[in-house]
Image (cartoon, grey):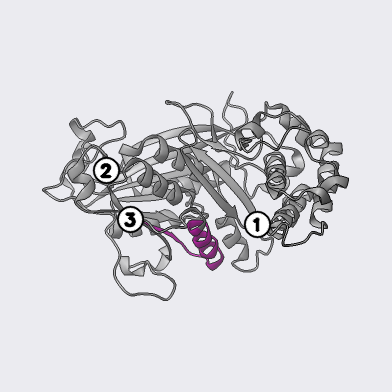
Amino acid sequence: MPDLSSASTTTTEFLSSTVPPTSYLPPIKSLSLFTETRILHQCLAYLRQLYVPNVRGSRRKKVKHSSNFTEFHSPTSSSPLTTIRKDSFERAHALRWLSALTRLESDSADSPDLADIQNEAAALLAICAGTASAGTVRRHFEFDSGRIQITLSDVPLSTNASNGDYFGSVGAQTWGGACVLAEEIADNTVVFFPNPTDVTDVSERTFRVLELGAGTGLVSLVAGKVAMLKIPGCKMDIIATDYYTSVLDNLKANIEANFPVPSPSLTISSKFLDWSSFSSPSDITSGADTSSPIGPFDVIFGADIIYEPLHASWIRKVVRNTLRKPSSSEKDCPDRNNNNNNNNNRQGGVFHLVIPLRPTFVAESNTIEQEFRFADPGLDKIKNDLVIFSREIIVCDAEEEEEDDIDQFSVSDDVGNQAGEGNIVRYAYYIIGWAG
């Protein structure tokens, strides 16, 4: 097996490894001899990158700039690790090794975190047997060449469609649209947040961010990390919202895991929001807490949140009542390409929306452009009207998976094949704001 004793062993090195489990993992008979649990953690990290399914449609196929996003789970379809992953003998060995680890007995004084390791091994064991039987899945993401790191949990999909369990569990999964928007935030910070070189703009007030349908919270978590890393002098308040209790519980846990220590300049929280009954910003609450009104927001994020015909209408109502309106004294907001000329000047808050162009959700996707008109010179006279400033198509590779994996891991195929495009996922990225 490879030398795991070095403290410098990283997930990046795991990704470049082509060693199969039979060679990589310590012998089962020697597991009882391991008193240093760090090595066991590294072995579990190695197995996660082999057998935990990747977020589909999160790897860009065509990019205008250098892409620095990586999810450390499964290899790309061209990687030798894909062959290892599909090897039934290697998978069987991994199952036996994980099973032995879960049964391992040890003095808790010698290895106090063995129970946590065994719980993670049990979850991996279930994943190797099929995600439908698995528990919570931990995912690790890196953006901006590793400077921004996020670890979060996905709640397992529920097969109970008779109540809210199914839709709640779908909301507690990390979807490709969130990965795409999170990457945009990490790579193009000045498009979304105050320019760190503008001391006045950064320090004068609190910059407010709202995420709709936050799910596992990846977009908000990346926004928070970006704020702390790239604009540390900026006071920022991020509110990640969702509807289902199970999603909100998981979202809160993910926030606490990534921001365990309070920051004097950043607050990030999870709150309940029902788009269908929304009437004012005070409807954004922490459960039953209806204390103080919330808003307006400088930036609103939405990723993969349109999957019912009425969603676009509801979302427009929410955005219209929470997005900061233009003021006569404020500076022009930077546009998509950081230009400030002609009709590219924008004032007020901005809504960034990413939706997958699913073949089975064409009608739902079309509702965006029915609810939000494209900006044109004729609309400049219509103040307080939300318009689409730009629409960009982002193309990502759909990870190649085994047929069984696709059946188990996918709720709905995001693959939007067009002539000659092959197995890809297409997203529409809208930038929406106030006309005038």
Secondary structure under tag 3 reads helix
Tell me residue 293's x, y (percent): 29, 69
Confirm whether residue 332 shows in the render: yes
Left or right: 153, with 213 as reference point: right
Q: Amino acid at mark 1?
A: Thr
Confirm whether residue 280 shows in the render: no
Secondary structure under tag 1 reads loop
Asked if the magenta segment contains residue 73, the reply would be no
Tell me residue 327's x, y (percent): 15, 51
Quadrant in which residue 338 is drawn: top left
Q: Amino acid at mark 3?
A: Val
Q: Residue tagged by mark 1?
A: 136
Vertical position of residue 405 compared to residue 205: above or below:
above
Q: Amino acid at mark 2?
A: Pro
Quadrant in which residue 3 is drawn: top right
Q: Which residues are magenta?
A: 237-256
Provide the major secondary structure of the magenta segment.
helix
Vertical position of residue 86 compared to residue 268: above or below:
above
Mark 1 touches mark 3? (CB < 8 Å): no
How crowded pointer 3 is (Cα within 10 Å; few <14, some 14-19, many 20+) is rated as many
- Number of marks: 3
Q: CA distance from mark 1 to mark 2?
A: 36 Å
